[in-house]
Amino acid sequence: MLDAQASGRGIVLDARSHGGRFAQLLRALHQVSGERVVVLTDEYDKPEIARANRDFLRGLYGVIKSCDAHIRFTLLTGVSKFSKANLFSGLNNLEDITLDPRFAAICGYTESDLDTVFAPELAGLDRKRVREWYNGYNWRGDERVYNPFDILLLFRNREYRAWWFETGTPTFLLDTLVRHGVNAFALDGLIADDELLSSFEVDEIAPEALLFQTGYLTVEEAVDRGGGLRYRLGYPNLFKVIERAGEGSALRQLAERGYAEKHRAGGEPVHLIGVEFSEETRNVANFETAAA
């Protein structure tokens, strides 16, 4: 990756280490362009990469600090916030903007975005229904934002579904929830503080913090109680309850979308289990099973 960036701009990298080559590239880009470099890193925390390449990544991030004179700014994005004392030990001048109201809309689409940029795509869609399905995220901003992945797939497929949840739920998240025996519905309304949501490691992640950092919980309310902020967390449009979906919809969706197909190859019996919850009673409202 470093060599590709360099060769495209006529830069030769001759340092032996990855960190050395990265530093060379930053200095050369600044010199060639006359402008300081912007460093954008996405998915810095992908678990399998972070575990296997911790020392390698720490070295690269250390270069960012040592080459500060050549960098305008650096933006690191990922689903979890690792401790500065570990992965970022060489980069101690980071500013966490996850819950900074100034950047609350940076990772989602606003109502204004839909009305302007995506106005042609809204034709034929029920705007209230779009809002109920996808406008559920808040990071202490003045307004909620839409999940971009869900919105784009809605526009393409013209069908209301939990697109992001169905296609983007990572294995490590499910494994963590099962390992800790998390009661998902007990987390709706959870009160959390900065300590819970802040520093944790890739192998030692509190399930509540993991759900928040991966977008399965969002901020419903922030309250300053004198000793620091407290956050009331909730689910952002993920669970469609029986009052909205109608009784029997859970099992019907399992059958209609063919979720059992990929499990038939093993030759073992496959059973569908549909569990529906009531928003009013906050309890199980319907339970159905069927042979697939």
Image (spheres, rainbow, N blue to C red):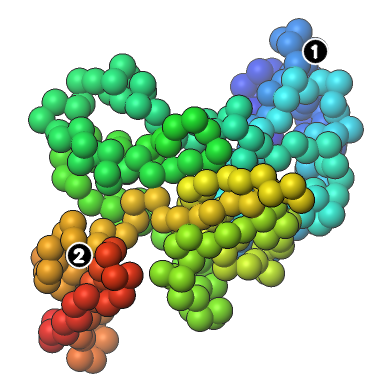
How many numbered tags mark residues here? Answer: 2
Neighbour class for label 2 at 10 Å: few (<14), some, many (≥20)?
many
Q: Position of residue 79 (x, y in %)?
A: 57, 51
Q: Position of residue 54 (x, y in %)?
A: 75, 57
Hey, which residue is sitting farthest right in the picture?
Answer: 66
Q: Which of the 4 image quadrants contains residue 124?
A: top left
Does residue 234 appear in the picture of this structure? yes
In the image, 173 versus 286, the foreground residue is 286
Identify the mark at residue 31; answer none if there is no mark. Answer: 1
Q: Position of residue 156 (x, y in %)?
A: 21, 37
Hey, which residue is sitting farthest top in the picture?
Answer: 34
Type of the residue with mark 2: Ile
Type of the residue with mark 1: Gln
In the image, 227 versus 242, the foreground residue is 227
Neighbour class for label 1 at 10 Å: few (<14), some, many (≥20)?
few
Identify the mark at residue 242; answer none if there is no mark. Answer: 2
Q: Is residue 5 left or right of residue 144?
A: right
The residue at 36%/23% (across/down) is 113
The residue at 64%/28% (across/down) is 5
Hey, which residue is sitting farthest front in the picture?
Answer: 226
In the image, 228 versus 81, the foreground residue is 228
Q: Which of the 4 image quadrants contains residue 155?
A: top left
